[in-house]
């Protein structure tokens, strides 16, 4: 389609300018399908004419075309789509007023979000944060649950105590209406009309053509049965990452998790793990039912345990206040005990501390419970007539002996569980490649793993020596602006450095175990140029958030068409 500027003077037509016209995502898909049906272009040409980013417009609400507005601030387009609602400054208030509460449309505005904010985020139409980058907590949750989000909006200052956020001299109070354009990172004062595109028949037809062409499988990152159902709706062929620790943040489980962490003896800890077991078992059963017959990669607990406890600063403030207002109270005693435990668990650099497989070695009871819950959930789904294929992933391995020790322990648990249940389950053990040493010693690790999944978020952090949240918040934008880096490596895979490690890993692993299953589950698994690189490497699958699955399906098809064209030349 061409956009033509012309004039007519004294009966003569003058063409002034001609350029490629722009289409919305739904229009681009419909025109491509219509032109194939009319015999004007081939299916392959149609697939190459629609960019994966345009599909985002087919999946998320947008500001009604033609709306005139001005922005009061801009940040990062962390979660595509548009949302409008009243400002709330706490997750508790968002949960009270938003979805599941009074049913009002709310926008959660925070300095930054953390796992404790999840309930409030899910109750909100959109999220706005002062700090954080494209792979911050807010951004990851946004893309995982399809919440329009603007993150890292440094021009706003959130003052929860005062009940407002400030943009220069402008004060926006709780209860005021704002609109977010998460696709462009825009913050707009007031309410704008928001429309949801229709998932037309052409959309399904177009993606079915992509599925016929691509060779990469596309899975989804999903942590709940509800996420899994969404993933299947968008065409996911399995789950590439189920983060089991996300199940611990639910309000009905968090007190049990905290009691388990605070336990002084193994016996006491086991008592609380036994209470958690039915919750995890039910979650896994629901996921296996939703994914009927599709493989499900389940990552055992990864973050350090202190993430499930109140923040250190919050506890210090509480103990100080209660020491003055309620000395001798039970609440003060409880907070003091919690503070002592959090101080004991405090780490200078938690990302490189007691987490992942290290946590599994120091506290083996936790992952033994999770392994039992996975297989009990799989067995329950199988008894219900569902086909199940659990893949149990051990995270953050850097030394082959870590994997050997953890896998041997969990194999005993798995065999004992299945013997008790009297069933056979097609399960496997593998690991996440997210440490450079693991990539460089993949030939050793592959002897004890039936699959690898590249966790490119952490692999990028450990390769660059960047703390993702700190880098995106403090200097990465400067690096990109000054062309020190061509792009943010947490958004677009660094093929020169991180990619070289991946290539070494793949080549070495396949020499030892030719049929090893290889995938990627970092955020890069939904980014088109990164998907093209994964295709080139010969990975078996990419995995991304459910709402990015259609984009990954198209990008994988385009990658295969491009490689075929290169071979033909």
Image (cartoon, helix red, strand yellow):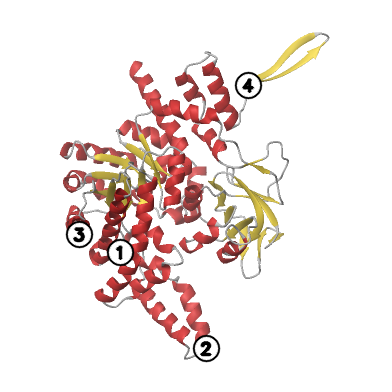
Nearer mark to the viewer, of 3 and 4: 3
Residue 498 point in image, percent of width and height: 33, 43
Q: Earlier in the sequence, mark 2 or mark 1?
A: 2
The image quadrant that residue 401 belongs to is bottom left
Nearer mark to the viewer, of 3 and 1: 3
Q: Name the residue under label 1.
A: 354
Q: Mark 2 points at which residue?
A: 326
Q: How far apart are marks 4 and 2 (CA)?
A: 72 Å
Nearer mark to the viewer, of 2 and 1: 2
Q: Mark 4 points at which residue?
A: 19
Nearer mark to the viewer, of 4 and 2: 2
Position of residue 377 in the picture relative to residue 315 (left or right): left
Name the residue located 47 percent from the left edge and 24 percent from the top edge: 47
The image quadrant that residue 415 belongs to is bottom left
Position of residue 303 in the picture relative to residue 3 (left or right): left
Q: Mark 3 points at which residue?
A: 420
Q: Badges 4 and 2: C-beta atoms under 8 Å apart?
A: no
């Amino acid at each position: 389609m061409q956009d033509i500027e012309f004039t007519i003077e004294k009966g003569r037509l003058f063409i002034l300018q001609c350029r490629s016209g722009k289409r919305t995502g739904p229009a681009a898909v419909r025109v491509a399908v219509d032109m194939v049906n009319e015999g004007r272009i081939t299916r392959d040409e149609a697939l190459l004419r629609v960019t994966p980013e345009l599909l985002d417009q087919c999946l998320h609400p947008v500001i009604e075309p033609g709306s005139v507005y001005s922005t009061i601030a801009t940040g990062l387009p962390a979660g595509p789509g548009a949302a409008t609602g009243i400002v709330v400054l706490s997750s508790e208030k968002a949960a009270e007023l938003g979805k599941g509460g009074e049913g009002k449309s709310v926008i959660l505005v925070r300095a930054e979000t953390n796992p404790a904010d999840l309930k409030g985020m899910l109750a909100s139409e959109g999220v706005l944060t002062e700090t954080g980058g494209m792979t911050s907590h807010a951004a990851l949750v946004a893309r995982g649950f399809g919440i329009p989000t603007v993150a890292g909006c440094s021009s706003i200052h959130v003052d929860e105590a005062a009940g407002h956020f400030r943009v220069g001299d402008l004060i926006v109070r709780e209860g005021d209406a704002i609109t977010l354009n998460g696709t462009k990172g825009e913050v707009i004062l007031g309410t704008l009309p928001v429309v949801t595109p229709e998932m037309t028949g052409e959309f399904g037809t177009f993606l079915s053509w992509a599925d016929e062409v691509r060779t990469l499988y596309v899975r989804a990152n999903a942590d709940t049965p509800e996420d899994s159902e969404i993933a299947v709706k968008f065409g996911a062929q399995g789950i590439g990452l189920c983060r089991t620790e996300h199940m611990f943040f639910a309000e009905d489980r968090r007190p049990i998790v905290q009691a388990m962490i605070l336990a002084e003896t193994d016996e006491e800890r086991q008592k609380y793990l036994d209470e958690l077991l039915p919750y995890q078992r039910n979650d896994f059963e629901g996921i296996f039912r939703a994914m009927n017959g599709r493989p499900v990669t389940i990552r055992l607990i990864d973050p350090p345990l202190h993430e499930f406890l109140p923040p250190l600063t919050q506890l210090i403030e509480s103990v100080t206040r209660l020491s003055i207002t309620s000395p001798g109270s039970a609440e003060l005693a409880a907070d003091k005990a919690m503070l002592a435990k959090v101080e004991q668990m405090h780490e200078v650099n938690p990302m490189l501390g007691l987490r992942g497989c290290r946590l599994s070695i120091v506290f083996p009871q936790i992952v033994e419970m999770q392994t039992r819950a996975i297989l009990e959930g799989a067995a329950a789904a199988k008894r219900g007539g569902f086909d199940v294929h659990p893949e149990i992933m051990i995270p953050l391995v850097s030394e082959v002996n870590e994997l050997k020790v953890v896998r041997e322990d969990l194999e005993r648990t798995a065999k004992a569980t299945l013997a008790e249940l009297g069933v056979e389950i097609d399960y496997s053990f593998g690991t996440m490649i997210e440490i450079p040493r693991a990539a460089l010693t993949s030939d050793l690790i592959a002897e004890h793993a039936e699959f690898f999944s590249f966790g490119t978020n952490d692999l990028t952090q450990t390769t660059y020596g960047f703390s993702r949240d700190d880098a995106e918040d403090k200097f990465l934008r400067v690096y990109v602006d000054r062309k020190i880096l061509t792009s943010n490596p947490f958004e677009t895979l660094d093929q020169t450095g991180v990619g070289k490690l991946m290539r070494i890993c793949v080549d070495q692993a396949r020499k030892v175990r030719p049929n090893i299953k290889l995938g990627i589950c970092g955020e890069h698994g939904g980014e088109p140029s990164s998907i093209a690189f994964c295709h080139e490497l010969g990975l078996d699958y990419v995995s991304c958030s459910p709402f990015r699955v259609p984009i990954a399906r198209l990008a994988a098809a385009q990658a295969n068409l491009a490689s075929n064209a290169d071979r033909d030349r």
